[in-house]
Image (cartoon, grey):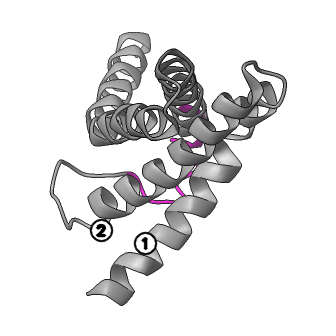
C-alpha cells in the first residue's frame, strides 16, 4: 500500500510542479523572499501528497480527473497555480508575522490540503457549466 501511495505521490508531484509553473515563475520574484520560497516548496509537497491521497482513493472525496486528461488540463493548471500562490502567500505571511518557519509551513499545508480536497467539485462544476453551454448552442 505504501508503494502504491508513493507512486501516486511521484506522479502527482510531477503534474503539480509542471502545471503550476505559472505560479512558480511569479513566486521567483515575490517578497519576503525566503518566507515565500519556503512556503511555496511546502505547498508543492503538500499538494502532491494530498492529490496522491485523494486520487488514489486512500481518502474518497470524489472522482479526480486522470493525470493526463487533456480536457481538464487548462483548468487544473490554473487551479494548481492559484493554490500554490495562495498557499505560499498565506505561509509567508504567517512566517513573517510570527517569525516561526513552522507556522508558515503549517499555513501553507492547510491551504494546500483544503484546496486539493475540493478539486473533484471544481472539475465537475466546470464540466456541468461546459455541458450547459454546449446544450444551449444546440
Q: Residues within 10 Å of mark 1 (few under 14, many from 20)?
A: many
Relative to 44, say whether 15 is above or below: below
Rendered location of residue 125, percent (x, y): 30, 25
Disc 2, SS? loop
> From this viewpoint, which residue is outermost toward the left?
60
Asked if one can make out residue 91 in the rendered structure from this viewpoint, the answer is yes
Mark 2 touches mark 1? (CB < 8 Å): yes
Q: Tell me the quarter of the picture where residue 35 sits.
A: top right
Q: Tell me the quarter of the picture where residue 71 sits.
A: top right
Instruction: Residue 71: say if magenta.
Output: yes
Quadrant that contains the C terminus: top left
Q: Which residues are magenta?
A: 65-75
Query: Which residue occupies the foreground of this view, 31 or 68?
Result: 31
Rendered location of residue 58, percent (x, y): 20, 67
Q: Which label belongs to residue 39? A: none
Relative to 2, say whether 127 is above or below: above
According to the image, label 2 marks what residue?
A: 56
At 61% from the left edge and 46% from the top edge, which residue is drawn? Answer: 41
Rendered location of residue 15, percent (x, y): 59, 56
According to the image, label 1 marks what residue?
A: 8
Amino acid at each position: 500500500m505504501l508503494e502504491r501511495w508513493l507512486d501516486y505521490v511521484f506522479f502527482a508531484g510531477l503534474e503539480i510542479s509542471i502545471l503550476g509553473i505559472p505560479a512558480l515563475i511569479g513566486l521567483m520574484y515575490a517578497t519576503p523572499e525566503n518566507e515565500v520560497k519556503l512556503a511555496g516548496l511546502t505547498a508543492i509537497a503538500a499538494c502532491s501528497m494530498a492529490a496522491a491521497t485523494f486520487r488514489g482513493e486512500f481518502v474518497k472525496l470524489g472522482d479526480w480527473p486522470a493525470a493526463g486528461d487533456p480536457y481538464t488540463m487548462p483548468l487544473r493548471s490554473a487551479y494548481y497555480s492559484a493554490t500554490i500562490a495562495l498557499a505560499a502567500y498565506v505561509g509567508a505571511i504567517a512566517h513573517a508575522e510570527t517569525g516561526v518557519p513552522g507556522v508558515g509551513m503549517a499555513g501553507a499545508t492547510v491551504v494546500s490540503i483544503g484546496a486539493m480536497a475540493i478539486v473533484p467539485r471544481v472539475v465537475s462544476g466546470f464540466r456541468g457549466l461546459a455541458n450547459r453551454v454546449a446544450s444551449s448552442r444546440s
